[in-house]
Amino acid sequence: MFTSSSASARGSLAVRLWAPLAALALAIAGCGGGGSPAPATGHGGGTTATGSGKLYVGLTDADGDFLSYAVDVVSLKLKRADGSVVDALPVRSRVDFADLADLTEFVTAATVANGVYVAGTIRLDYSNAAVTVEVNGEPREARVVGQDGQPLGVVDLEIRLDDRNQLMITPGRPAFLQLDFDLAASHAVDVSTVPATATAAPFIVASLEPVTERDLRVRGPVKRVDTAAGTYTVDLRPFNLRDARLGELVVHTGADTAFEIDGQSYTGAEGLQALAAKAGGTPTVAFGTLSVTDRKFTALRVRAGSSVAGAQFDALRGNVIARNNDSLTVRGATLIRRDDSVAFVRGDVTVLVGDGTRVLRDGQRGLLTAGAISVGQRIEALGLAGETEGVITLDAGQGLVRMQLTRLAGTVVSALPGEMTLDLEGIDGRRPGIFDFRGTGLSADVDADPASYQVATGVLALDDLGPGQPAIAIGFVTPFGVAPPDFEARTVVDVAALRAVLGLGWTERGTAVPFTRLDAEGLVIDQANADVGLRHHILIGPRIVDLTQLATPVTVVPGAGMGLYAIGEPGRVEVFGDFARFAARLSERLGAGAKARAMSASGHFDPGAFTLTARQVSVGLIP
């Protein structure tokens, strides 16, 4: 049945549901013939050396239930059809996957020897993993262990590409590789222990095209600017790596590209001219899209100079949970220091603002005052960080605070033209109970109330939203002390239109009969199976569907076109672009004695037909 994910339910269920840290794609450096290194050079496309082509790799993470999930990626090796193996990762990289929700990090634009690549091996090191989950509104440490209950150390995983859709490097058109770190099909968290226990069996899926669309991020210092062509070229440096050089990439800009350079806003050609006036090596970060046809990256937003986190200032990212005069409190935040170190702070951080603070709304021109920053707002604050007796303070009095789009989830109380009232269930995934809304209103009696949170919607259509229906609003919190309304929406989404995420786990011993039907047309989940574990839900925005309480078992059917279907077993993963072949192989493995341990799927759920139409399905098996 459908249920509302109340604050208390979130606290106990969130880390047991679907933990979709999807799509780990890691840096692939250049390699020459015979597996010897070749320079990763080029200009964002085409061929740069005889017998080689361009390969792009990105890293992404779907919105999940971990507040932080940082591990070390040690190496990545690719295997060609002729059996030759190439060391493909030039630097050890520490990556916090939870910091990349709904975003793809562009990590290499490498020159790679021509050929067909059929498999690979990735090495992860969990020795110094830093994982955080939320328990009753508080960030808590989680210890990562293997299936045997022992702490994970170095883990090697074999990666297999679909034999009908392999990675081919040829001159002309750049190739793209995405590796999906599917913790949804291989991860469970027990919050009853201290620290929490995260049991992992890393599950990596390789694909040549992203199944879902996300913004792409490109980071690195400027090498050159071509104002006539409307482009600039960067030396890729992801993960806040100061010295790494992972290939050149051309960033295309247009008339609508929004620039922020040293805290100043520009648009289009004006912004590119301002970038051209900066010295070579100026740090940049761009957000945009990659075309499928020619692999051209086009920026929608560009930041440069001191506007880049960690360039001139320390930076803090998170949501404001309270405000007292010019002191903002952020609980559970990512701290990026000027030495390029990155850490997730589990406790409260104080951000100091004042008359000298430059305040911007992401993607919009014009400066605001510090009074614009209110409780609930997601921010990126640039300033000087200090620590006294374990308490961290970031002084942004002479720095910058960028207000970022904030996501509300809740149930509609009322909806009228231009306004909507929500019973809040989450602000950027955090439970409303952690926020102190005192001072947000014109007077104390009109301070924001999470049970009756007023959202200004302007001309946005609300025809499909009525009382009791779940909804998502994306926008900015009203300035502090000015509410009501409490929030200015830029987008309102009916939850029925949101992506549905299925998370299903069985007991540690697994089950030999997870489905009552499994064929080329789809699969039917056996909701009455005695081995169904803690995870048995479909998550749709703020709503949870309990699979065991439905009147009819859920059927998972393939979506139109090529999908991403994977079967993971200890040490190896098989990937299929075609559901029929996936179903046949899964049936074969179950028939041979393998047991299902976990399953994830994402797509659109039709509650009337009890059907999930999915283009991405993963099933984890054990012997």
Image (cartoon, helix red, strand yellow):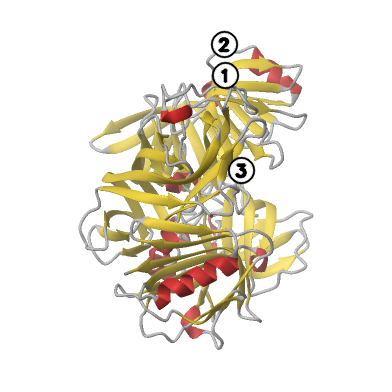
Secondary element at tag 2: loop
Instruction: Please indicate whether residue 622 sits to the left or right of residue 589 in the image.
Output: left
Q: Residues within 10 Å of mark 1 (few under 14, many from 20)?
A: many
Q: Find the distance from the CA under tag 2 to the CA under tag 3.
A: 27 Å
| Residue at image location 58% in from the left, 51% down from the top | 165
Residue 562 position in % (x across, y down): 64, 58
Residue 380 position in % (x across, y down): 50, 37
Residue 147 position in % (x across, y down): 27, 63
Evaluate if marks 2 and 3 touch, with contact meaning CB atoms under 8 Å apart. Answer: no
| Residue at image location 42% in from the left, 36% down from the top | 351
Residue 616 visible? The answer is yes
Residue 501 visible? The answer is no
Instruction: Please indicate whether residue 86 sits to the left or right of residue 206 in the image.
Output: left
Q: Residues within 10 Å of mark 2 (few under 14, many from 20)?
A: few
The amino acid sitting under disc 3 is: Asp
Secondary element at tag 3: strand
Q: Which mark is residue 68?
A: none
User: Which residue is more in the foreground, 223 or 5?
Assistant: 223
The amino acid sitting under disc 1 is: Val
Please identify, in this view, whether the residue under mark 2 or under mark 3 is nearer the observer: 3
Q: Which residue is mark 1?
A: 222
Quadrant location of the N terminus? bottom right
Residue 327 position in % (x across, y down): 43, 38
Q: Which mark is residue 215?
A: 3
Q: Residues within 10 Å of mark 3 (few under 14, many from 20)?
A: some
Picture layout, residue 379 above or below residue 491: above
Evaluate if marks 2 and 1 touch, with contact meaning CB atoms under 8 Å apart. Answer: no
* Disc with the residue nearer the chain's start (2 vs 3): 3
